[in-house]
Structure formats: structure tokens, C-alpha cells
Amino acid sequence: MASLLRPPRFARLVGLSVALASLNACGDAAKPAAAPVAPAPSGAAVTASPAPDAGPAAPSLPPGVPDSPAGHQLAWVMGALGQPPTEADVSARFADGFTAQVPPAQIVAILSKLGAQLMPAVIDRVEAQTPEKVVAVVRSARVPGGPKLRVSLAVEEAEPHKIKGLLFRPTVDAKPAASWDEVQTGLRAVAPSVSFLAADVAGGKCAPISAIEPKKALALGSAFKLYILEALAAQIAAGKHSWDDPIAIEDKNKSLPSGDMRNEPAGKTFTVRQFAEKMISVSDNTATDHLLAFVGRAAVEDAVKSSGHASPARNVPFLSTRDVFALKLLGTADELHGYVAADVPHRRKLLESFEQRDLSSVPLEEHGWSRPRMIDSIEWFASPEDLCKLMVALKARADAPATAPVGAILSINPGLPDEAGAYKYVAFKGGSEPGVMNLTWLLQRKSDEKWVFLTIGFNDTGAAIDETKAIAAASVAREFLGK
């Protein structure tokens, strides 16, 4: 069952892997280590390997997986996706430096979440291998054309060869486009409503390269969080706040997944920057709602307008994730239609009443839904041109000393891996709920160092978006833009 306000499936997988990715090589999540390419046999079936004791055991290896220290640990990881390990298992398998930064309990949780999305799985191919490193593509066998992940694993040189780096990245197999017409054809095949813009970015302006209905505003899902980041950066630039200001967790601002900050106790503090990083990189809804409360709803509404949005009134009142959950999960049909029909002052009063409703009363299985719910009226909206203007504004924030962290925050999660190495910088935010998907990038090409923009929006009021098909089409568009 799909869940509201999560990034698209592949972006979700990246979000889950951020903590693991941060321990690759020198600890830079944005620049994970990669092993040199050396093709190996493919089509390996996944089998679980026994839990370790003092050190890694020697499990039987799936066909094609190298008989090496890294290969044996890869076999264990694949087994752990199918049957989550204990914290003791993890402690025995992972290097101390790894578990010092990512606790065993968190590793168990990440493997469990990834396994739930992938299993049963097969090793599609091994792309690279050395004794201490292996890179393999893992494919879900649950449905034809299921999601794929590229798993990069590195082990210590000394026995017992504990895991010192582990990164899961999304990957898709799609035929490259030969023209923008082919790119557009692939995008149009995904959903009945498609908006798309590829543009050059220079001098604070967006110059279109290729587009589909660039002025059409569609529902955004979690891509709306870019407006909160812009409002926050504006206040920091004005000296009202700093990146190190503390914000305390409040129960009233806790939301539903995605994100784990909802599990933090009330009163615990994090810095403004930590909240912003969580909001953008893993689309944490609780982090988002705390920042919205911190900067103020009116300030975000002003940011939407000042960014150049063509129809800012569509986002007034600017909804929190909790607002949307409360409306769509706890509102009756009459209440929802009443909210949509109300004027802005009345809507604000209605939101105050919905904010008092207890989201914890919603059964876990109801946190998501499989079919679109009022995505054309209770959501956040922007056109490709609106989003390009917003990314240009955020680029200006990243170029200014006081708000330079904006650039780093936007680049933690690239959305899709840059397999061809076409880009020097990748900023990304995506979002989805049933019937909604948005993927938005600001990029700097390596070939000419030019800045470019890409956004793709899919809406379907009648059915959920085929995420695998959408991601494949989006990857083709981004690859073509990088040439």
C-alpha cells in the first residue's frame, strides 16, 4: 500500500540508504566509493547465509557471486534482506567504525525496510569485484520489471573482513533517447497528466530546452518542501535565525511517515540544519512540520509568492503534512468538500480544528492508501516554470555565504544515481502519493559546467502512478539532458 508524502519508490530506497552510504570511503554520503568495473556472471539467486559468531562464516555462494571476502559478505547481506538479522549478527558483521555511526538497530531497520520492498530478490548481475569490494545489481522477483538496486559493498582487508562500507542505490534499465521527442514520448506514456521542463539556468533565469505544458500546475507531493527551505533560507539571510538554532520536538508537530523523527521524544532538540537535512534528504514529514511551525505558515506563503509562482493562491493556506493526513485520513466526505469550498479565512479555522485530531488513532494499515484522494484540490501545486524559478532562487541562496548550506542540503539525496558521471552537482527533491509523482533537479553538467534544470510531474486522479515506469522515463530524460 502506497503512503502519502513519500518520495517515489526509488528515491525512498535512497533515503533509507543515506545512513549506510555515509560510511563509504571518507564518509561522504554524496560521493560514495565505487569499485572498478569488472563484469562477472549474472542471474544469481539469493540464498540466506548463516548468522556469524566470532567472524563471518563461509556461506554457500549464489552462482556468479565472487568467492572473495567481499563476495561472502554480499551473500550475507542478501540473506539479511530476506530474513532480518539480529543486532548481534550486525555487530559481528560490521566494522566498529561503521556501527559507531550507524547503530546496529538502525542497520537492522534499514535492511528490513529494503527487504520488504525487494524480496524475493535475485542478483541480476555482478558489475565489479576485487577481493575487498563488490558491486552487484539486485532485482526484485516479486513482479516482472520490479525495482532494482545497485549494492556496493567494501570490507576490511584484515580478517574477519568486516563490512566497512555498504551503499544501496536505485538503478533502472531503460533505452537511451536519441532526441527530446523520444524523451517526451516516454514521459507521456506514464500518466494522463504530465508536466515537464528541461531548461538552461543562467543569469537567474530559466531558458526552456524542451517542455510539456510548462505552465500547468500539478500536485507535487513532498516536492512542496522546497518552499519551506526557501522560506527558512530567507529568514536566515535576514538574520532572524541561524542554521545552529535549536528546535525542540513537540508532539503537536509530529506527523506520519515518511521519516523517523516522529519517534523522537518531546523536548529533544536538533539544530535547524538537522531538521532541514531530514526534510529534504529523506523527506521526513515530522521534520517538515517542525520547520513549517518554526518559520511560520505566512512566511512560507510569502516565499511561494516571492519565488514567482504564477498562482500562489492555490497554496493558501499552506498545508502541513499533518494537515493533509488529518484531512484525508480523518475527514468525512462532507468535511473534505466543505474545506475545498470554503474561503481562505474559513479554511484556516477548519485547519485549526483538524490539528486537534489524533493521528495516533489511525490504524497503521491506514497510514497509506492505494488510490488517489482529492489530489486536484487538497495538495500542494506548482507548474514546471514555478519550480524552475524556485530552484533558481535556492541556487542563489546556495551561492550566498550565510545560506550556503542550502546547496549541501539539496545534494544529499540525488534521487537517481548519476551512472554516467554526467553531472558535477546534483540537487534533488521528489514527492509522491497515489496518483502523484514529482521529480525535480537542479544540475551542473561536467562537460560544459553549465547549470540546467529538470522537473517531471505525473498526476492521475483515477489510479496510482506506475513508479517503475515513471522512474525509467525520468532517468532517460536526465541522462539525455546530461549530454
Image (cartoon, rainbow, N blue to C red):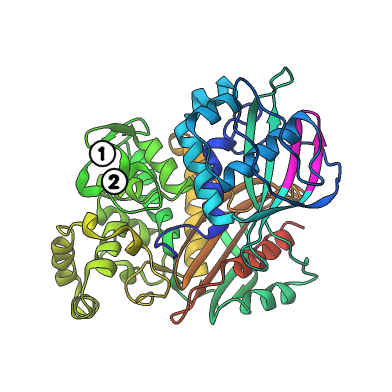
- Is any part of residue 400 visible from this angle? no
Residue stretch rendered in magenta on the structure: 126-136
Q: Residue at x 19, y 77 (%)?
A: 342
Q: Give how far across and how far down residue 347 sits, in percent.
A: 18, 70
Q: Please, what secondary structure does the residue beneath circle 2 have?
A: helix
Q: Please, what secondary structure does the residue beneath circle 1 have?
A: loop
Q: Which residue is mark 2?
A: 290
Marker disc for residue 464: none
| Quadrant position of the N terminus in the picture | bottom left
Tell me: residue 372, above or below residue 393: below
Q: Residue at x 75, y 50 (%)?
A: 448
| Quadrant position of the C terminus in the picture | bottom right
Secondary structure mostly seen in the magenta stretch: strand
Tell me: residue 469, above or below residue 127: below
Q: Amino acid at mark 1?
A: Ile
Q: Which residue is mark 1?
A: 249
Mark 2 surroundings within 10 Å by alpha-carbon count, few (fewer than 14), some (14 through 19), many (20 or more) = many
Whether residue 127 is in magenta: the answer is yes
Q: Is residue 42 left or right of residue 108?
A: right
Whether residue 271 is in magenta: the answer is no
Q: Amino acid at mark 2?
A: His
Mark 1 surroundings within 10 Å by alpha-carbon count, few (fewer than 14), some (14 through 19), many (20 or more) = many
Q: Residue at x 61, y 66 (%)?
A: 468
Give the alpha-carbon distance from disc 2 to disc 1, as whole Å.
7 Å
Tell me: residue 345, above or below residue 359: below
Residue farthest top in this picture: 158
- Is any part of residue 420 visible from this angle? yes
Instruction: Say whether marks 2 and 1 touch (CB < 8 Å).
Output: yes
Q: Give how far across and how far down residue 16 sits, in percent.
A: 51, 45
Q: Is residue 242 left or right of residue 162?
A: left
Q: Residue at x 73, y 62 (%)?
A: 173
Q: Is residue 211 left or right of residue 332?
A: right
